[in-house]
Amino acid sequence: MRGFMGWIERLAQQRHVRAIGRGFTAALPIIILGSYASASVALLQTLVALGLIPADVSAAYSRRLAVAPNLAMAAMGLALSFSVAYHLARGYHLKELRSGFSSAVAYLMLMFIAIGVSRGVAADRAALIIGSPVVAIIVAFVSVEVQRFLTWRKRADCELR
C-alpha cells in the first residue's frame, strides 16, 4: 500500500497534473453554468418525453435551446485551455498570460476549423467534441510545450553567439 501511495504522491507533484487541477479549479464557475444549461435542455426533453409539453412546442424551441450546452462546452473548454496553460507555464517559469492567451487562441482556431469542416448537424457534434475538457487540456499542453521549446531554442541561439 505504501508503494502505491508514494506513486500517487509523486504523480500529484508532477507539474502537468498540478496544472490540470488548478485549471479545473479556475474554470469551475463556467463548468457549473454549463451544467445548468445542459440540465435545462435535458429537463425540457424529459418533459416532452413524458407528454407534459406538446411536441410541436418542443420542436420549435429544442433546436435553439440545444445551442446553450454547446456554447457552454465551448466556453468551458476555452477557460480550461487558458487556465491549464497559465498554470503549466507558471510551473516552467514562462510568461503565464502569453501562454494562456496563445493556448486560448489555438483552441478557438481548432474549434472554428472543426466546425467549418463539418457543416450542418455534424457541426453541433464537432463543437461538442472539440469543447471537451480533454481536447482543451491537450491544446494547453501542446501550446505551452511548443513555447517552452521555442524559448529554449532562443536561449541556445543567444548562448552560441
Image: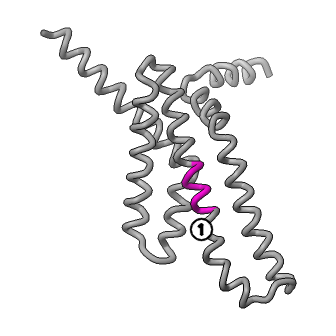
Q: How is the image coloured?
A: one colour
State left or right for residue 79 relative to residue 52: left
3 versus 51 height, above or below:
above
Measuring 49% from the left and 33% from the top, which residue is drawn there?
A: 85
Measuring 64% from the left and 19% from the top, which residue is drawn there?
A: 10
Quadrant including the C terminus:
top left
Measuring 68% from the left and 41% from the top, which residue is drawn there?
A: 28
Give the magenta part as a residue range: 69-76
Is residue 100 magenta-colored?
Answer: no
The x and y percentages for residue 118 are 42, 70
99 versus 79 height, above or below:
above
Is residue 74 magenta-colored?
Answer: yes
The x and y percentages for residue 156 are 23, 15
State left or right for residue 158 relative to residue 69: left
Q: Quadrant of residue 129?
A: bottom right
| Secondary structure, magenta segment, majority class | helix
Q: Quadrant of residue 51?
A: bottom right
146 versus 76 height, above or below:
above
Measuring 63% from the left and 70% from the top, which residue is drawn there?
A: 66
39 versus 90 height, above or below:
below
Q: Which residue is mark 1?
A: 67
For this orientation, the residue located farthest to the left is 161
Residue type beneath disc 1: Val
Quadrant including the N terminus:
top right
- Foreground residue among 108 and 128: 108
SS for callout 1: helix
The x and y percentages for residue 47 are 83, 78
